[in-house]
């Protein structure tokens, strides 16, 4: 196969092709044509503006083979996420000038499903990003700490770092200064834990900060907070997330066995109503029976 490193090297091979075959990456043929006009349009659709430094980690959704008049392969490329094109003549993936042009080219030839699939994925991505923004906003709004501190926690998470034990200790001291009563501190932390995504997976990692702070409170304090007249459903939601998350308390089984039966029953009921299947399963496992270990 001819090898080059610039976009025009691939373009020259596409220009020389007499036939093209477009396939699902691990499936059947989507389109095949030797029509000169269609080949010219596809060549425009697959224009590469620049060659990037790296490669996408996947193998691509679609493969495109360019053949000469004798059916010999001139170039084989793979198409990635309506963004890049991979050709083994490039030192990295090629950034497409128009990422969706191939999908429209296929749609004009009666193959609509790739374009429909891309639109659905794009729509879901936009919706997911909106949900993520709303969750972060609610988590920030529930935070019982200054906004500058919350900003730093989110930035630490986004950088891939974790909040250290020393930092959590400092946050606990700041919270104690603002809320001297331990039961009140437990309530604001439980409310904070119930905000955001509420996940127990540790993603986003900044949502683990309320867990780390709650873990520094005795379970008796949390139980007293949940037994207080000020305790609302949101506090129980936060408590379920805290007590069922993967690494919330060092001696969780012992702590769970010490819960008063009426508190444990309400926590279980709240957990089983969660929209998060992981929380429902963990609530059933951790709160639905006593633990002796």
Image (cartoon, grey):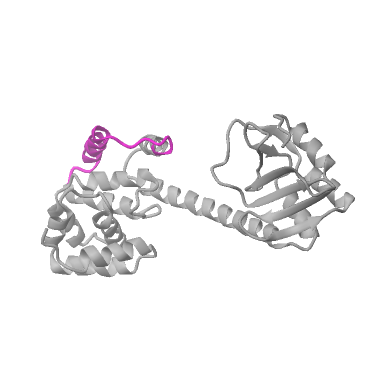
Q: Which residues are magenta?
A: 157-181
Vertically, is 212 above or below 231? above
- The answer to whether residue 72 is left or right of residue 186 is right
- The answer to whether residue 61 is left or right of residue 179 is right
Asked if the stretch drawn in magenta spans residue 247, the answer is: no
Vertically, is 105 above or below 277? above
Quarter of the picture holding the N terminus: top right
Between 253 and 227, the residue placed more toward the observer is: 253
Q: Give the x, y percent position of residue 195.
A: 37, 53
Between 252 and 6, the residue placed more toward the observer is: 6
Q: Residue at x 52, y 54 (%)?
A: 128
Quarter of the picture holding the C terminus: bottom left
Between 265 and 144, the residue placed more toward the observer is: 265
Q: Give the x, y percent position of residue 150.
A: 37, 39
Q: Hey, which quadrant is residue 274 in on the image?
A: bottom left
Q: Residue at x 62, y 52 (%)?
A: 61
Q: Residue at x 69, y 44 (%)?
A: 77
Asked if the stretch drawn in magenta spans residue 161, the answer is: yes
Q: Hey, which quadrant is residue 127 in on the image?
A: bottom right
- The answer to whether residue 90 is left or right of residue 187 is right
Q: Give the x, y percent position of residue 67.
A: 78, 47
Which residue is outermost to the right? 36
Vertically, is 237 above or below 13? below
Q: Residue at x 78, y 32 (%)?
A: 8
Prevalent SS, magenta region: helix
Q: Give the x, y percent position of residue 178.
A: 25, 40
């Amino acid at each position: 196969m001819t090898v080059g490193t610039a976009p025009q090297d691939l373009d020259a091979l596409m220009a020389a092709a007499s036939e093209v075959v477009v396939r699902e990456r691990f499936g059947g043929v989507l389109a095949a044509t030797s029509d000169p006009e269609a080949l010219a349009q596809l060549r425009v659709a697959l224009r590469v503006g620049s060659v990037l430094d790296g490669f996408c980690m996947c193998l691509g959704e679609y493969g495109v083979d360019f053949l000469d008049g004798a059916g010999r392969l001139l170039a084989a490329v793979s198409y990635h996420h309506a963004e890049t094109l991979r050709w083994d003549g490039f030192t990295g993936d090629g950034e497409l000038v128009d990422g969706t042009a191939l999908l429209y080219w296929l749609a004009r030839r009666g193959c609509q499903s790739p374009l429909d699939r891309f639109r659905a994925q794009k729509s879901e991505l936009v919706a997911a990003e909106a949900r993520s923004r709303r969750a972060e906003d609610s988590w920030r709004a529930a935070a019982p700490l200054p906004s500058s501190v919350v900003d730093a926690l989110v930035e630490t998470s986004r950088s891939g770092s974790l909040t250290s034990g020393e930092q959590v200790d400092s946050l606990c001291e700041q919270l104690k200064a603002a809320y001297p009563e331990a039961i009140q501190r437990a309530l604001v932390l439980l409310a904070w834990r119930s905000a955001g995504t509420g996940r127990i997976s540790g993603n986003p990692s900044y949502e683990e900060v309320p867990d780390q702070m709650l873990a520094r409170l005795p379970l008796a304090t949390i139980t007293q907070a949940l037994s207080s007249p000020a305790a609302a459903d949101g506090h129980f939601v936060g408590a379920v997330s805290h007590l069922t998350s993967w690494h919330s308390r060092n001696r969780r089984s012992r702590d769970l066995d010490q819960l008063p039966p009426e508190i444990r029953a309400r926590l279980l009921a709240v957990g089983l109503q969660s929209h998060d299947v992981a929380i429902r399963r963990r609530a059933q496992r951790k709160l639905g029976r006593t633990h002796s270990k």
